[in-house]
Amino acid sequence: MVQDHQGERRSVFERWFPERHLYLRANGETRGYVLTRGRQMLGVAVGALLVGWTLVASGGFLFDLATDSAADKAVQRTRAESARRTADLQARLDSAVVRMTTTTGSLDDMASMVERRHAALTQVMTMFHGVQGAEQALRPARPKADADGNPVRRILGVRMDQERLIARAEGFAQTRAERLRLAFRLAGLNPAAYAPQGAALGGPLVEARDPKALAAILDVDEAFAVRIGHAADSLTEMRGLADAAEGLPFNRPTQARTTSGFGVRFDPFNGRPAVHQGQDFSAPLNSPIGATAPGIVSFVGVRSGYGKTVEIDHGRGFKTRYAHLNATAVTLGQRVALGQRIGAMGTTGRSTGVHLHYEVWVDGRPQNPARFMKAGDQLVQQD
């Protein structure tokens, strides 16, 4: 029975890969070549690998292209929504000016409401402290001179400025949050997993999520309390994503040129297809290498094939590896900052020349470093 199966397998191979003879005639001479069954099978296997490699690379490119397009449209939608709300606000304010200038309401009551609104607005503005670009974007407009000195118009002018400022604050936070979500998606990460799950801000903005309760706590009208709550929510998400992004390896280990990317490639030593789990950078010997995110050095030494290596644990399951170094500048257990020099480029280990082999790992699995660096470029453009 075993012999029958073996004979059947042989007959299948003989039918698909029969021994072939190739004859080439040139200058009156004829040369013959024998294509054995083994050579034919090897050729088919190499062809299948090349086709598979091409499909994977093309799929990755199309996925990146689709992700970029969808994310850019999301940012545009956020900006359009913010502009629409601003236009609606201006229309409502213009209507309010007409109504209130025809009334004989108490100036003291109007001034008191403006003061209470200002106190609530101050709480929101303090939350933007330290946010890149916020000071310039949210700078209050200079008050316009009032020709007739009408106190009602002056109070209404201040109130309108307050409405515009809270609208700009909400739009600024929403746009920044959307760009941060885009960066996470470019890195292949789910932004929802890194957004704050609960309120991260203190004070009455957190204690009361209901508009009526928030209005009572801040002692302002309910409409303004709703705007304050929306701005605080957007800011909470933005700050949470920004804080998470600061601890992830979105930076570049060196500004050197890339010589080899992540994925299947031909091994430089044996010429066979092999998986390359990182990204290579080429530069002169002893070019400085920097940490791509803050973290703690988890390994310094020599690894088989990698040569002199530094590994950094960034928390949240993220780890980076820097290999083929000529020298190291950190010690085991040392805490390093973003961009801190951790070593010098070299050619130790299984290397054909001076370069850095850089890897990014998430929960024990290698990731494409190019995606993380693309996310970092997105954050730089945001700033």
Image (tube, helix red, strand yellow):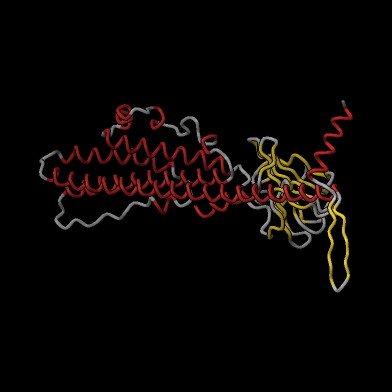
Assign the N terminus to one quadrant of the image.
top right
Q: Nearer the viewer, residue 40 or 359?
A: 40
Name the residue: 44% across, 32% down: 202
Q: Is 256 left, or right, of 328 in this rendering?
A: left
Q: Is 206 left, or right, of 195 in this rendering?
A: left
Q: Nearer the viewer, residue 352 or 56?
A: 56
Q: Is 217 left, or right, of 103 in this rendering?
A: right
Q: Is 340 left, or right, of 217 in this rendering?
A: right
User: Can residue 135 be seen here?
Assistant: yes
Residue lying furthest bottom: 27
Image coordinates for residue 148, horizontal then vertical, percent: 14, 56
Q: Nearer the viewer, residue 236 or 273?
A: 273
User: Can residue 349 be seen here?
Assistant: no
Image coordinates for residue 145, horizontal then vertical, percent: 22, 57
Image coordinates for residue 317, horizontal then vertical, percent: 66, 35
Image coordinates for residue 335, horizontal then vertical, percent: 70, 42
Q: Nearer the viewer, residue 45 or 226?
A: 45
Name the residue: 73% across, 57% down: 288
Name the residue: 20% across, 49% down: 154
| Number of numbered discs | 0
- The image quarter containing residue 5 is top right
- The image quarter containing residue 311 is top right
